[in-house]
């Protein structure tokens, strides 16, 4: 084959990204690596157009930051999938696409005549990915869920938070994010296979099941040792591992390391070199015993020695000292700290795009750098129905037909 | 039923968390993932709890096992020139090389991207370092927990008046980083098949994690607003939160998204109707008072029974499951999420399946985690064409160790 340097990795793949309740980050993964992604919006716009936070002082359908972020590089068609004409248009589009992504409750696409059975008859190589809270079948498949309830039923929430309060949900809708990124992986694998001449797949993604994968080793503790792992925020996970207050905030220190004591000795050397009173005792052999590190006594002794020292320094001073000695010690950063990171600046991580009204929006850019087929921001998120005409023309509708569809209200 | 990545071979230098989880995704999809191990420098997770029956051993960690299903293991000393040569021969025939070392480690071994590309024009080479291949912080080391601290996940999770809580786990290792890396790898494999060209994937584990809090970052970058912790309350929805149930440390998450759901919740819990609680705006104004009333009533209910009653009434509610609950959940069971694989040393043990099902392809893990070096001889024989005598000699001389 001839080589095409710098072609987009996903050039030639067309995706229909149905704007549903679980957002459109999965479609963004495809769009940002060069697939043609058509956001199929209901007449009132994608649900994420109505989410907070918005661009300050605005309330229009292009002002949601979530919408702007999740829909870069996409086209938009406003299409009413609950009308016969809208469904017919969708079938035409699907017959020319590689992938459909949707997140409606199970059964909704079937009622519209747009389920896998119907669409694969029109296009045998089509992959249809359904992202739902619980999956397409099973006793809870018709249940309602939000990010909050899915984090509960997926077991991550129980591991998070303070022992003396309710468990805590992670920020940023991680259940929704997890469902979208795993849907991206599964969809990409199915498209990869279909492009080799195999039939397409119905890909069934469960948000609850995605969250379960974030339980670390808790299920294995239950399976192998019969113990239930609990939450421990506000305490040290092991002596020397946890959140510590410092002069201007907090740091996370992992002197216990992962499964080994290799960071204990370097941390001790550091504290002794700093002249921290009492740090010499960390050279006693008991501190190399994990069974001792989990005790309250060990945590209290470590805290009594380390915390006064940590409180005398800022998080960035502590970070620099940890870096010098290769100790896993990180400042607990907020979004301003992150935006000022010299490393992100060096990598050009944040990118700027102008929204439809000309406002400059800075947002996270490439999550990965591909040397031959780089991630690229080619265009801003679309206005509602901005590309309806082009998309209908691509699907083979004449000007007159398009006019008729608009008059019926099937498209905007 | 076929496997979607059958025929794809991966030479896998990754270890511990995010790297091994990434290649588990590929292995469970049917790729032949060959994990390059060393008995001199063990994958730390092999010696990390929990162990089968609480007894430590390099082949007994459940933490390791779950992240390494469907893979093969070869012990190979790449610091010996003969071992390095064997690694290069394996790479020359493979589609993908993976690692999650700090930048420079693979170069020192003689297996950096330039060296590997000279062996194979089509190779995809994925590196997952903490901060990326270049830049002022490239040498930083990190773990999931420190990445969570640096990316705002820790700062923005928990109660406003308490110290940051975070997820309590190495979360970036489990979902954001493996998910994004696997996606990028699959895209690069597609490009490889179309063009015959490989490429270098430079992933900084900070960056997919930041991608998962995009709107909060934009709230600062666009509006100058620094998001902080707000407990379990969801913006715009009241009541929303985590409420106590009967029993020891039992909780239920409830999120009322509209007024109709509120009416149903009030009926199920027998909440006295207050006129100004009928609208979302009214409830948002009195969030704390309503939370207290809801909590008072949920506290007498069994969490699973209340979840079912609320779901039957059409209210989004989810019990806060612990590890035993997820293993016994009827929905995960109906999906076949938990699979029992018979490990040669650990016996039948529980593994996660991937969170997706395909209508016409396998998705579940095909085999338990490998013993340390379990497949050394078969890989040497089948892929490197070595005879038994040579394999024995290389083992005795510490090359296959």
Image (cartoon, coloured by chain):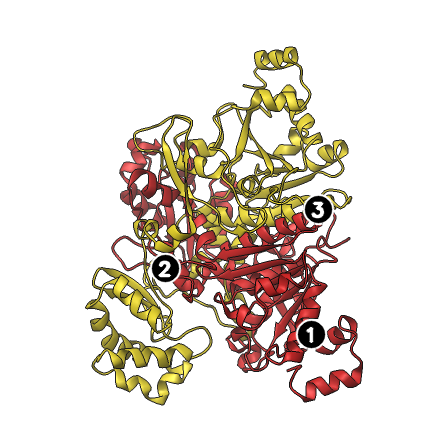
Chain colours: A yellow, B red
Q: Chain of mark 1?
A: B
Residue marked by disc 2? B149
- B248 horizontally vs B161: left or right: right
Which is more N-terminal, label 3 or label 2? Answer: 2
Task: Say above or below: B225 vs B373.
Answer: above
Mark pair 2, 3: CA separation: 40 Å
What residue is at 68 percent from the left and 37 percent from the top?
A98
Q: Quadrant location of residue A187? A: top right
Report the mark closest to the observer, 2 or 1.
1
Q: Are marks 2 and 3 in contact (CB under 8 Å)?
A: no
Q: Are marks 1 and 3 in contact (CB under 8 Å)?
A: no
Of residues A334 and A42, the one drawn nearer to the viewer in this rendering: A334
Which is more N-terminal, label 3 or label 1? Answer: 1
Residue marked by disc 1? B86
Q: Which mark is residue B152?
A: none
What residue is at 36 percent from the left and 87 percent from the top?
A286
Image coords of residue B123 (percent x, y): 65, 58
- B186 horizontally vs A362: left or right: right
Image coords of residue B285 (percent x, y): 27, 37
Residue marked by disc 3? B194
| Quarter containing the C terminus of chain B | bottom right
Q: Chain of mark 2?
A: B
Image coords of residue B85 (percent x, y): 67, 74
Q: Residues within 10 Å of mark 2 (few under 14, many from 20)?
A: many
Q: Chain of mark 3?
A: B
């Amino acid at each position: 084959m001839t080589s095409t340097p710098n072609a987009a990795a996903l050039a030639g793949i067309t995706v229909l990204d149905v704007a549903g309740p679980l957002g459109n980050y999965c479609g963004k993964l495809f769009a940002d690596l060069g697939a043609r992604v058509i956001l199929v919006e209901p007449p009132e716009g994608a649900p994420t157009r109505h989410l907070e936070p918005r661009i300050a002082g605005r309330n229009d359908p292009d002002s949601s930051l979530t919408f702007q972020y999740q829909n870069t590089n996409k086209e938009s068609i406003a299409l009413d999938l609950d009308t016969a004409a809208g469904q017919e248009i969708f079938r035409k589009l699907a017959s020319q696409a590689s992938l459909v992504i949707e997140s409606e409750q199970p059964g909704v696409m079937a009622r519209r005549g747009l389920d896998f059975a119907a669409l694969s008859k029109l296009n045998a190589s089509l992959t249809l990915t359904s992202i739902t809270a619980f999956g397409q079948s099973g006793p809870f498949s018709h249940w309602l869920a939000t990010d909050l309830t899915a984090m509960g039923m997926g077991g991550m929430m129980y591991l998070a938070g303070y022992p003396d309060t309710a468990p805590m949900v992670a920020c940023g809708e991680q259940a929704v994010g997890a469902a979208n990124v795993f849907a991206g992986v599964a969809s990409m694998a199915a498209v990869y296979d279909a492009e080799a001449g195999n039939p397409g797949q119905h890909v069934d993604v469960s948000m609850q099941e995605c969250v379960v994968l974030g339980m670390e080793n808790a299920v294995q503790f239950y399976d192998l040792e019969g113990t239930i792992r609990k939450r421990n925020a506000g305490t040290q996970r092991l002596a020397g591992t946890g959140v510590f207050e410092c002069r201007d905030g907090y740091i996370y220190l992992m002197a216990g390391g992962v499964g080994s004591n290799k960071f204990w000795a370097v941390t001790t050397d550091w504290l002794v070199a700093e002249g921290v009173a009492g740090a010499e005792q960390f050279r006693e052999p008991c501190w190399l015993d994990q069974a001792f590190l989990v005790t309250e006594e060990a945590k209290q002794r470590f805290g009594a020695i380390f915390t006064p020292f940590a409180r005398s320094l800022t998080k960035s001073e502590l970070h620099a000292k940890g870096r010098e000695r290769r100790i896993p010690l990180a400042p607990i950063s907020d979004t301003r700290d992150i935006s000022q990171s010299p490393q992100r600046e060096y990598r050009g991580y944040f990118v700027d795009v102008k929204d439809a009204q000309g406002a400059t929006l800075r947002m996270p850019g490439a999550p990965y750098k591909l040397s031959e087929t780089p991630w690229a921001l080619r265009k801003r998120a679309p206005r509602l129905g901005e590309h309806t005409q082009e998309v209908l023309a691509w699907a083979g509708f004449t000007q007159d037909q398009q006019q008729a569809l608009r008059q019926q209200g099937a498209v905007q | 039923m076929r496997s979607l990545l059958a025929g794809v071979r991966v030479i896998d230098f990754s270890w511990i968390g995010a790297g091994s989880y990434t290649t588990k995704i590929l292995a469970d999809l049917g790729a032949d993932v060959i994990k390059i191990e060393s008995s001199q420098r063990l994958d730390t997770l092999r010696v990390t709890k929990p162990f089968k029956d609480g007894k430590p051993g390099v082949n007994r960690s459940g933490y390791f096992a779950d992240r390494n299903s469907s893979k093969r293991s070869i012990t190979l000393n790449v610091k010996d020139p003969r071992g390095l040569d064997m690694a290069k021969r394996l790479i020359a025939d493979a589609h993908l090389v993976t690692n999650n070392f700090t930048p420079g480690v693979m170069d020192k071994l003689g297996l950096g991207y330039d060296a590997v590309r000279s062996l194979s024009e089509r190779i995809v080479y994925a590196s997952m370092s903490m901060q990326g291949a270049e830049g002022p912080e490239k040498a930083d080391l990190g773990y999931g927990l420190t990445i969570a601290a640096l990316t705002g996940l820790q700062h923005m999770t928990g109660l406003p008046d308490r110290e940051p809580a975070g997820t309590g786990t190495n979360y970036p290792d489990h979902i954001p980083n493996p998910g994004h890396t696997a996606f990028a790898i699959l895209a690069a494999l597609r490009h490889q098949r179309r063009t015959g060209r490989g490429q270098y994937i430079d992933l900084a584990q900070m960056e997919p994690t930041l991608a998962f809090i995009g709107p909060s970052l934009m709230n600062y970058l666009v509006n100058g607003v620094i998001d902080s912790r707000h407990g379990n309350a969801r913006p715009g929805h009241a009541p929303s939160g985590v409420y106590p149930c009967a029993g020891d440390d039992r909780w239920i998450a409830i999120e009322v998204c509209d007024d109709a759901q509120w009416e149903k919740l009030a009926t199920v819990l027998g909440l006295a109707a207050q006129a100004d609680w009928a609208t979302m705006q009214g409830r948002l104004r009195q969030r704390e008072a309503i939370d207290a009333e809801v909590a008072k009533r949920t506290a007498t209910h069994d969490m699973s029974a209340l979840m079912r009653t609320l779901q039957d009434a059409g209210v989004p509610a989810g019990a806060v499951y612990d590890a035993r609950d997820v293993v016994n959940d009827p929905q995960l069971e109906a999906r076949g999420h938990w699979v029992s694989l018979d490990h040669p040393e650990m016996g039948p043990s529980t593994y996660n399946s991937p969170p997706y099902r395909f209508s016409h392809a396998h998705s579940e893990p095909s085999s338990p985690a490998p013993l340390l070096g379990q497949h050394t001889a078969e890989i040497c024989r089948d892929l490197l064409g070595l005879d038994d005598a040579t394999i024995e000699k290389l083992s005795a001389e510490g090359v296959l160790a």
